Image (spheres, grey):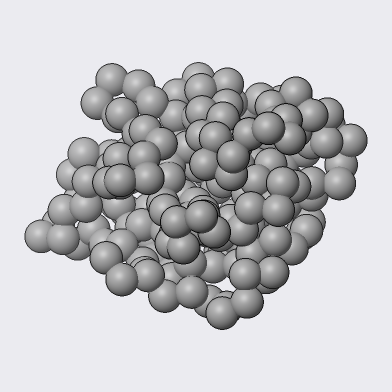
C-alpha cells in the first residue's frame, strides 16, 4: 500500500516523547543489552522487534489488569496492549537513530462485527539502506497470529477484511495517536478497557 508520512522530516520520527522516553535509564540499559556498534540498522530493528514481540506480554493474552503506557513502564512491567508495545519498540529504535513511526488498523475486536471494532497499533521503520518504510507488528504471537520481521513482504499479525469494515490507515504518524494515548491514561483496568473502551476509529 502507499504510505503517507505525517512529516517529510525523518528527524520527526526520532523525537523523544512522553510515551517514547528513550533517555530513561531502564530503556538505556536494555538498549545496551540488545544492541552493539557492529549491528546493521536492519539487524538492530529485528532484535528490537523480536524482543518486544516475544518478551513483553500482551495484557489481554495474560489477562492482566495492569495498564502501561510509557515505554519505560512497559519495559519495567514487561506487559502492555499493542499501543503500549508500539511505544516501547519506537523507543528502542529511536534510541539508535532509526526513524520509527506509528501505524494503525481498524479491526474487529473479537471474531464478529457484532462484538465491535477497535483500533490496533503497529510500527513503521524507515531503513536508510533500503530507502523505504517497513511495517512490523510486535503485538505478540499466539495460536492464529504469526507476525514476523521481514524486509521483503509484510508479515503482520492480522489480515484486513474490508468486507467486514476493517481497514488500514495509510498514515505513518510521528507520535502515538492521541486517541490511543488517552484511553491508556484514562483507565486503570486493562481488561475492562480492552473489552469496552478502545477507540473504534481514528
Whether residue 39 is visible to the viewer of this picture, yes or no, is yes
The residue drawn where x is 36% and y is 40% is 150
Q: Quadrant of residue 47?
A: top right
Image position, residue 126 (x, y; %): 52, 58
Asked if residue 119 shows in the view, the reply is no
Q: Depth check: 39 or 6 in front? A: 39
Picture residue at 33% right of the left edge, 58% below the top: 106
Q: Residue at x 31, y 62 (%)?
A: 168
Q: Quadrant of the N terminus?
A: bottom left
- Which image quarter: residue 25? top right
The reply, left or right, for residue 54 in relation to residue 109 is right
Q: Is residue 16 above or below residue 189?
A: below
| Left or right of 152 in this view: 85 | right
Quadrant containing the C terminus is bottom left
Image coordinates for residue 120, horizontal then vertical, percent: 42, 51
Where residue 121 sits: x, y (%)?
Answer: 47, 51
Viewer-proximal residue among 43 and 58: 43
Identity of the residue furthest to the left in this view: 163
Q: Is residue 159 left or right of residue 68?
A: left
Vertical arrangement, residue 80 with respect to residue 164, above or below: above
The quarter holding residue 12 reads: bottom right
Residue 5 position in % (x across, y down): 48, 74
Seen as rendered, the residue at the extreme right is 25
Q: Is residue 39 above or below residue 86?
A: above
* Side of 159 where 122 appears, left or right: right
Residue at image x 46%, y 49%?
Answer: 122
Count of marks overlaid on the render: 0
Amino acid at each position: 500500500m502507499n504510505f503517507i508520512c505525517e512529516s517529510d522530516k525523518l528527524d520527526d520520527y526520532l523525537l523523544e516523547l512522553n510515551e517514547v522516553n528513550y533517555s530513561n535509564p531502564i530503556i538505556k540499559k536494555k538498549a545496551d543489552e540488545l544492541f552493539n556498534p557492529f549491528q546493521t540498522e536492519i539487524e538492530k530493528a529485528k532484535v528490537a522487534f523480536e524482543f518486544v514481540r516475544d518478551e513483553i506480554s500482551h495484557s489481554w493474552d495474560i489477562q492482566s489488569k495492569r495498564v502501561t503506557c510509557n515505554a519505560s513502564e512497559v519495559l519495567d512491567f514487561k506487559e502492555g496492549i499493542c499501543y503500549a508495545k508500539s511505544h516501547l519498540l519506537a523507543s528502542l529504535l529511536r534510541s539508535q537513530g532509526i526513524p520509527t513511526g506509528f501505524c494503525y488498523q481498524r479491526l474487529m475486536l473479537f471474531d464478529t462485527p457484532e462484538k465491535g471494532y477497535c483500533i490496533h497499533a503497529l510500527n513503521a521503520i524507515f531503513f536508510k539502506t533500503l530507502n523505504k518504510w517497513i511495517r512490523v507488528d510486535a503485538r505478540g504471537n499466539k495460536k492464529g497470529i504469526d507476525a514476523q520481521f521481514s524486509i521483503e513482504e509484510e508479515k503482520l499479525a492480522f489480515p484486513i477484511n474490508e468486507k467486514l469494515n476493517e481497514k488500514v490507515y495509510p498514515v505513518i504518524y510521528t507520535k502515538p495517536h492521541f486517541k490511543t494515548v488517552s484511553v491508556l491514561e484514562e483507565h486503570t483496568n486493562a481488561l475492562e478497557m480492552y473489552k469496552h473502551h478502545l477507540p473504534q476509529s481514528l
